[in-house]
Image (tube, rainbow, N blue to C red):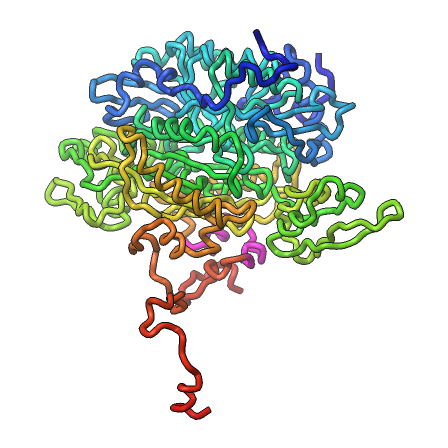
């Protein structure tokens, strides 16, 4: 029986898209606190403002992250959501689950929490939405002891790393994203659970430049798969595409009325570097000119594949606009091998170079991309011990204001003004 | 022996991380990892991945609200147990993927999904609109300027045909963040729905002493609009802050740092629409979304103004863009002046950047198109 009238929310029960309102109502039949979620949300819909209090520091012993405190500002009216803390449970890499595991998590959340979740949060965790403070330790105890699972990150720490599904089900992945993600998640458990950074730090692992996990837009440390050699080509399959026997772009356009496939218009003319052409009925690629954007491969996945010498590009410093504006991650390492065989030690070395520097010079609540902006890319390149290369910039600077170092200038900077004046009257 | 509140540190397990992903791979995935040859979308929402071994993995993708109950997750598990050897996965865009190892198993799975009302819509692939990534909104967040789940439901109801078909010039990624913190990182989306505030923070002098580190609140303001001040509370002078409202850009960062500076407001808050962002490196470099509609009101439960604005942009793009062009690529090709004209969106001074790095967006060429904007 509904505890509150929810006429506004009820309007979200119609329509073809799944209704979260219907879903919460069903859950409320066995978890009555869900009626108070609906009650408070209905009030927010009516008043057009949130009814959650600011903050509240809660957690489990020994961890500084993984739990986000949340309290209702109308606890008497909605006692079921008086405490409504979020628990972030670190998702398995690639977000595959066995039903056995998912059911166990559901049972645990039925016992200790509201029964509502987010599958998943923006960073990647399973979000257990809404429990009381006194439920946190028992939940954590059973999560670790019975399920063998752990919390993710929150606050100024390494946030829960995330990856695209990579080689598990994608032909384009240029390294094993799920193994990299899992390995580094395990390697940095302390950094995930105990905040020691100036601000949050995110890892994301995408297998190719299509970047399905939005690493270049959303992570401080983006590992994006790429290759060094030539795009692998199957000329027979190219002919099949040209004959219209294989749908373009893996079937992405099946419902549209785009006419017959035109390799010139759809592939060659859209290549950003103009490095493809037809020679008779053979497709040619000048691979030295290719910037590996993926377009031709996306359009003809059965004819073209990433090269066989595979690795990743590392880009650093993406973030959303708060405060100085949004930043994409900047290309720092053009090509690095990413391999479980060396336990990713070369990637770890890059990460720790960044952290050692950022933990020293980063200001409170300054993302690494903002620190890079503040000190400048030349300084960051030096800190990273890298040789500057033209690939680090879109174009050379257009102002002449170079910070020359004294040792770079013949004779140094110490000069005698009296000697100068002896030769140059004022 | 369960948790003992008297001895919380006894027998404690920490830092064990997530379970290894390989425990959760469906058999066809485990057998063919790293050996996939190609994929094909055979119908909206259905993907076939072909392995070197000849094995096929057939995936049925269904949309879900991000906000889901354990009852619904259990129902997903029932489906996966009946059809998928007890495995399933979630995508980064809150879709659920059910995988089977032969084409013959697809139709029974589809029939099962269809028998469960509108809970499991199949789609979200190829040149269509896939699920909206979004934040918490009024259902769980303390800083939102709009709701999230409600707006998303209203928008997806309207765009449903684009979720279940692949008729657009390219994929369209829509995202919603309920305030400028952008937990949803909407800054690189084809269409971004962004909650914004328009009233400066109030100062709760009665509470500020106990809950706020004043230097942090002051330094939190990117424009230096928060200054130290004094106020009288119960006859006593206290240290507090004041806000130079003329300099406030309504980012809300002060409230994040100081609970005594709330700024949410039913009239002040609403939605801005940004378009033309992309994450993929395909063809053109990743792009930020650009602000084209500075404000739409919060109108629960179905936000008709926001829904209409998103639909209008989508439909205009669908009718005008070339095959493979993302919204941002289309807008750049035709020129932003044409974007505003074709979409019939009024261009306002609020789309002219006056924040940092703004100069990058000013036009410094004589090349432009004559549109109705030039009188």
Q: Is residue A258 left or right of residue B345?
A: left
Image quarter hosting the N terminus of chain B: top right
Q: Viewer-proximal residue, A223 or B209?
A: B209
Examine the rendered structure and indicate whether residue A373 appears above or below residue A199: below
* Residue appearing at x 53%, y 43% in the figure: A198
* Residue appearing at x 44%, y 83% in the figure: A417
Residue furthest toward the right?
A: B235
Q: Is residue B10 magenta?
A: no
Q: Viewer-proximal residue, B80 or B348?
A: B80
* Residue appearing at x 43%, y 44% in the figure: A356
* Residue appearing at x 56%, y 22% in the figure: A128
Q: Quadrant of residue A352?
A: top left
Examine the rendered structure and indicate whether residue A199 appears above or below residue A34: below
Residue B121, how many percent across, how many down?
Answer: 47, 21
Q: Residue B64, can we see it?
A: no
Q: Quadrant of residue B247?
A: bottom right
Q: Is residue B282 left or right of residue B199?
A: left
- Give the residues drawn in magenta, as a range: B334-355
Q: Viewer-proximal residue, A52 or B126?
A: A52
Residue B283, how many percent across, how many down?
Answer: 32, 45
């Amino acid at each position: 029986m509904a505890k509150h009238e929810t006429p506004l929310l009820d309007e979200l029960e119609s329509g073809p898209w799944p209704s979260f309102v219907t879903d919460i109502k069903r859950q409320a039949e066995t978890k009555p606190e869900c009626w108070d979620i609906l009650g408070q949300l209905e009030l927010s819909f009516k008043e057009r403002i949130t009814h959650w209090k600011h903050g509240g520091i809660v957690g489990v012993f020994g961890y500084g992250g993984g739990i986000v405190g949340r309290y209702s500002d109308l606890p008497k009216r909605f006692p079921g959501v008086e405490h409504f803390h979020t628990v972030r449970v670190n998702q398995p890499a690639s977000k595959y689950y066995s039903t056995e595991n998912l059911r166990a998590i559901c049972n645990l959340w039925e016992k200790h929490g509201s029964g509502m979740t987010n599958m998943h949060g923006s960073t990647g965790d399973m979000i257990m939405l809404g429990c009381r403070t006194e439920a946190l330790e028992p939940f954590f105890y059973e999560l670790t002891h019975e399920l063998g699972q752990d919390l993710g990150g929150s606050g100024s720490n390494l946030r829960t790393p995330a990856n695209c599904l990579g080689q598990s089900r994608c032909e384009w992945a240029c390294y094993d994203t799920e193994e990299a993600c899992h390995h580094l998640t395990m390697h940095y458990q302390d950094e995930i659970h105990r905040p020691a950074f100036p601000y949050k730090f995110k890892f994301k692992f995408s297998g190719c430049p299509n970047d399905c996990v939005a690493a270049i837009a959303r992570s401080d440390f983006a590992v994006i798969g790429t290759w060094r050699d030539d795009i692998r080509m199957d000329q027979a399959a190219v002919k099949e595409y040209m004959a219209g026997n294989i749908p373009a772009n893996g079937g992405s356009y099946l419902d549209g009325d785009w006419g017959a496939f035109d390799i010139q218009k759809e592939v060659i003319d859209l290549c950003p570097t103009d490095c493809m052409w037809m020679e008779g009925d053979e497709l040619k690629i000048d691979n030295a000119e290719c910037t590996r954007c993926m377009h031709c491969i996306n359009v003809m996945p059965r004819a073209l594949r990433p090269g066989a010498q595979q690795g990743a590009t590392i880009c650093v410093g993406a973030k959303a606009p708060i405060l100085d504006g949004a930043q994409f991650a900047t290309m720092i390492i053009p090509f690095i091998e990413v391999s479980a065989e060396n336990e990713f030690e070369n990637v770890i070395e890059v990460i720790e170079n960044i952290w050692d520097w950022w933990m020293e010079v980063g200001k409170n609540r300054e993302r690494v991309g903002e620190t890079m902006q503040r000190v400048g890319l030349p300084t960051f390149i030096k800190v990273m011990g890298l040789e500057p290369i033209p690939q680090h910039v879109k174009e050379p600077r257009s102002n002449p204001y170079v910070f020359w170092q004294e040792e770079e200038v013949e004779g140094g900077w110490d000069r005698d003004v009296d000697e100068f004046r002896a030769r140059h009257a004022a | 022996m369960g948790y003992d509140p008297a001895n919380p540190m006894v027998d404690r397990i920490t830092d064990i991380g997530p379970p290894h992903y390989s425990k959760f791979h469906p058999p066809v995935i485990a057998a063919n990892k790293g050996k996939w040859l190609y994929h094909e979308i055979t119908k909206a929402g259905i993907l076939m991945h072909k392995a070197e071994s000849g094995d096929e993995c057939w995936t049925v993708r269904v949309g879900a609200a991000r906000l889901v109950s354990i009852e619904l997750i259990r129902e997903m598990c029932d489906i996966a147990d009946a059809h998928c050897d007890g495995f399933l996965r979630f995508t980064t865009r809150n879709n659920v993927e059910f995988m089977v190892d032969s084409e013959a198993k697809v139709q029974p799975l589809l029939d099962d999904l269809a028998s469960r009302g509108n809970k499991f819509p199949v789609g979200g692939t190829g040149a269509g609109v896939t699920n909206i990534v979004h934040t918490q909104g009024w259902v769980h967040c303390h800083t939102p300027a709009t709701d999230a789940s409600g707006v998303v439901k209203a928008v997806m109801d309207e765009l449903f045909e684009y979720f279940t078909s692949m008729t657009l010039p390219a994929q369209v990624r829509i995202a919603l963040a309920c305030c400028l913190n952008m937990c949803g990182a909407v800054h690189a989306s084809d269409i971004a729905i962004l909650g914004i505030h328009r009233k400066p923070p109030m100062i709760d002098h009665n509470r500020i002493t106990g809950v706020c580190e004043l230097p942090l609140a002051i330094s939190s303001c990117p424009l230096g609009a928060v200054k130290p001040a004094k106020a009288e509370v119960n006859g006593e002078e206290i240290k507090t802050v004041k806000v130079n409202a003329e300099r406030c850009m309504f980012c809300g960062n002060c409230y994040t740092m100081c609970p005594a500076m709330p700024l949410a407001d039913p009239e002040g808050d609403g939605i801005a629409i940004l378009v033309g962002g992309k994450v993929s490196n395909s063809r053109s470099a990743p792009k930020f979304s650009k602000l084209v509609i500075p404000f739409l009101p919060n109108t629960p439960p179905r936000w008709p103004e926001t829904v209409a604005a998103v639909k209008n942009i989508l439909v205009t793009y669908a009718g005008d863009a070339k095959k493979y062009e993302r919204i941002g690529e289309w807008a750049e090709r035709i020129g932003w002046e044409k974007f505003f004209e074709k979409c019939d969106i009024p261009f306002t001074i609020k789309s002219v950047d006056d924040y940092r790095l703004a100069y990058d967006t000013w036009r410094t060429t004589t090349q432009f198109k004559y549109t109705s904007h030039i009188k």
